[in-house]
Image (spheres, grey):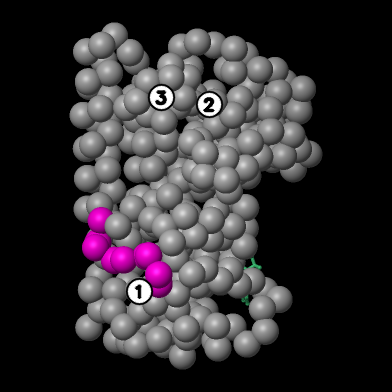
């Protein structure tokens, strides 16, 4: 029986810590404000945006909401980002992805000030992560590190295998595990004999985007398995990239879906809002 890593409980801990720090800052007259921008009305994006705003409210972070129509042009969106970059009362800027077709996501994300880039997607922050300088770290992989640390799972010296090399999960995940002195292998769709590689892992982080692809055959006995994937099945139930029922009996510890990595992403966004104040005001929080 694997230990079930409770992402909901750990996310609640992180948010409570953020709430306390936000309250301390308020006593010093420092407020924290996140601007959330959504273009169009993609239903999944609307749910994410609503949850992010609710989380802000729960920890005492002010959120400003910009809901723009589907027909918004690149120039209009860039102008809004410029405006938010210039505003002293806005600490963090989040543009919800995906943007409607016709908008150039990369140009928009690159335009967000690296000091307000709470998603950690700006190339300057990605560079800071790779050389170990302070900056914003993408929320989902940062959340995975917190799940491991707060569950008492050692990373130092362990064989860590990441499946997936996306800019928002796989690549920063590899960098963070390396920073924690893991021995890291990042695998992807061109990897030959994936099972042979994943079977070496003490810690296996799965971010493929394929429902229940990872079964027990991919996992070493006693390994920690972190499932980043999230999918809604035909039955309306959520599942991950890992086949939980198959892997749980062989793993030493495993994250469920829902209730594993998902809640950590928003908790780390709240944490990154504190980072934004620290970077802008050159204070430690
Ligand atoms: P992506 O599609 O950008 O990247 C998927 C990666 O998996 C690619 O690098 C690809 O090379 C690799 N891959 C695809 N097929 C493979 C195969 N057969 N063998 C090995 N590697 C393969 O996806 P992403 O944005 O990194 O997201 C991955 C999953 O995580 C998705 O299910 C997504 O919904 C989920 N996600 C969850 C959260 C969260 O908060 N829980 C956040 C971000 C993403």
- Seen in the picture, residue 198 relative to 174 is either above or below; the reply is below
- In the image, which is nearer the foreground, mark 3 or mark 2? 3
Q: Which residues are magenta?
A: 150-158
Spatial separation of the CA atoms under disc 3 and disc 1: 33 Å
- Seen in the picture, residue 222 relative to 139 is either above or below; the reply is below
* Callout 3 touching callout 1 (CB < 8 Å): no
Ligand 1 picture quarter: bottom right
- In the image, which is nearer the foreground, mark 3 or mark 1? 3
Q: Which disc is residue 278 wearing?
A: 3
Q: Earlier in the sequence, mark 3 or mark 1?
A: 1
- Seen in the picture, residue 237 relative to 57 is either above or below; the reply is below
**Mark 1, residues whose alpha carbon is within 10 Å: few (<14), some, or many (≥20)?**
many
Nearer-the-camera pick, 214 or 72: 214
- Tell me which residue sits at (37%, 83%) in the image: 247
Q: Check disc 2 and report the residue beneath it.
A: 116
Instruction: Indicate the position of residue 192 as horizontal and vertical percent values.
Output: 67, 84
Spatial separation of the CA atoms under disc 2 and disc 1: 34 Å
Task: Tell me, yes or no, whether the highlighted magenta stretch contains residue 161.
Answer: no
Instruction: Indicate the position of residue 94 as horizontal and vertical percent values.
Output: 53, 32
The secondary structure that most of the magenta stretch takes on is loop
- Give the side of residue 147 with respect to residue 137, left or right: left
Instruction: Indicate the position of residue 138 as horizontal and vertical percent values.
Output: 51, 45
- Give the side of residue 130 with respect to residue 22, left or right: right
Spatial separation of the CA atoms under disc 3 and disc 2: 11 Å
Q: Earlier in the sequence, mark 3 or mark 2?
A: 2
Q: Check disc 1 and report the residue beneath it.
A: 224
Nearer-the-camera pick, 158 or 164: 158
- Tell me which residue sits at (38%, 42%) in the image: 268
């Amino acid at each position: 029986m694997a230990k079930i890593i409770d992402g909901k409980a750990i996310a609640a801990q992180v948010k409570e810590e953020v709430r306390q720090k936000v309250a301390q800052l308020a006593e010093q007259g420092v407020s924290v404000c996140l601007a959330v921008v959504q273009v169009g009305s993609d239903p999944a994006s609307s749910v994410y945006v609503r949850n992010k705003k609710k989380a802000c409210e729960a920890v005492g972070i002010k959120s400003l909401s910009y809901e723009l129509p589907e027909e918004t042009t690149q120039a209009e969106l860039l102008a809004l980002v410029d405006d938010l970059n210039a505003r002293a009362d806005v600490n963090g800027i989040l543009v919800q992805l995906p943007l409607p077709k016709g908008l150039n996501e990369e140009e928009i994300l690159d335009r967000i000030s690296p000091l307000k880039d709470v998603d950690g997607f700006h190339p300057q922050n990605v560079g800071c992560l790779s050389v170990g300088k302070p900056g914003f770290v993408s929320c989902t992989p940062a959340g995975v590190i917190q799940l491991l640390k707060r569950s008492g799972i050692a990373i130092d010296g362990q064989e860590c295998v990441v499946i997936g090399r996306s800019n928002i999960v796989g690549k920063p995940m590899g960098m963070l595990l390396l920073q924690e002195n893991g021995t890291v292998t990042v695998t992807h769709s061109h990897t030959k004999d994936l099972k042979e590689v994943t079977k070496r892992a003490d810690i296996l982080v799965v971010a493929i985007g394929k429902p229940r692809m990872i079964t027990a055959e991919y996992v070493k006995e006693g390994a920690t398995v972190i499932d980043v994937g999230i999918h809604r099945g035909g039955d309306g139930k959520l599942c991950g990239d890992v086949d939980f029922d198959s892997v749980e009996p062989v793993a030493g510890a495993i994250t469920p879906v829902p209730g594993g990595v998902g809640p950590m992403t928003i908790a780390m966004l709240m944490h990154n809002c504190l980072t934004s104040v620290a970077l802008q005001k050159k204070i430690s929080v």
